[in-house]
Amino acid sequence: MSDSKNGFPLKSARTGHWVLVGGVLTALLLIGAYDDPVLAFLTVRWQKLLVATGLHHYAEHLQAGIDGGITKRLLPAVATYAALYLALCLLLLRLVLLPVQWWLAVRLYAGTLAVYGAIVLAGELAGNDAARCAYHLSRQVLDFVISPLPVAGLYVFFKRSLGPLLTTGSR
């Protein structure tokens, strides 16, 4: 149930809404604070899954082709962690922003991830030394995206700067 005027829950549902916001925020903070145990858990699960499906040799070959200075963790586990963290960030934003603001936030995240992909691709195409430089640059972009900073920044931006423009329809 939501108020058709602003897209937020009705007053009777606001308590549950804010409990959900608190739960998602707590999960986000715990996953961020305990990233090593979470990654260790995901690594074990992925290793078992890869062995069970017979894809562990392919994963080992793929992992061996990556410079040890780049990552020592299993790539599917790292990707799963990043996707989980990003999903929680977007869910939190969905819970605290208006729908039009949330869609803009999703587009900003997508654009940032596209920049990340372009840097990685450019580094791969440019060669070995450029790949290492591109990795370090792309790693900074990814570390920024997979952090609470964009969530906090987007929330403040939409609530203080752009929020009134989007809710009134002004440009």
Image (cartoon, grey):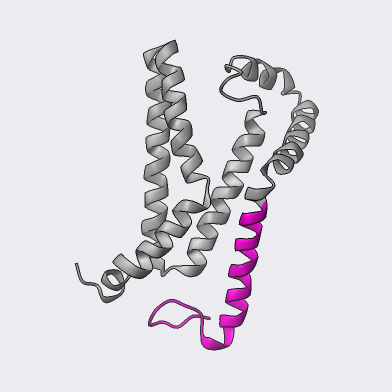
Magenta stretch bounds: 1-30
Left or right of residue 121: residue 164: left
Q: Residue 25 at what x, y percent from top left? A: 60, 62
Q: Is residue 12 magenta?
A: yes
Q: Quadrant of residue 72?
A: top right
Q: Residue 117 at what x, y percent from top left? A: 42, 32
Q: Among all residues in the image, which is located at the extreme top?
A: 128
Q: Residue at x 58, y 42 (%)?
A: 82
Q: Quadrant of residue 79?
A: top right
Q: Is residue 64 above or below residue 29?
A: above
Q: Residue at x 51, y 68 (%)?
A: 95
Left or right of residue 49: residue 7: left
Q: Quadrant location of the C terminus?
A: bottom left
Q: Residue 20 at what x, y percent from top left? A: 62, 70
Q: Is residue 9 magenta?
A: yes
Give the tally of numbered discs. 0
Q: Is residue 102 above or below residue 70?
A: below
Query: Which secondary structure class fits the magenta region best?
Result: helix
Q: Residue at x 37, y 50 (%)?
A: 108
Q: Residue 18 at what x, y percent from top left? A: 58, 75
32 or 16, which is in the foreground?
32
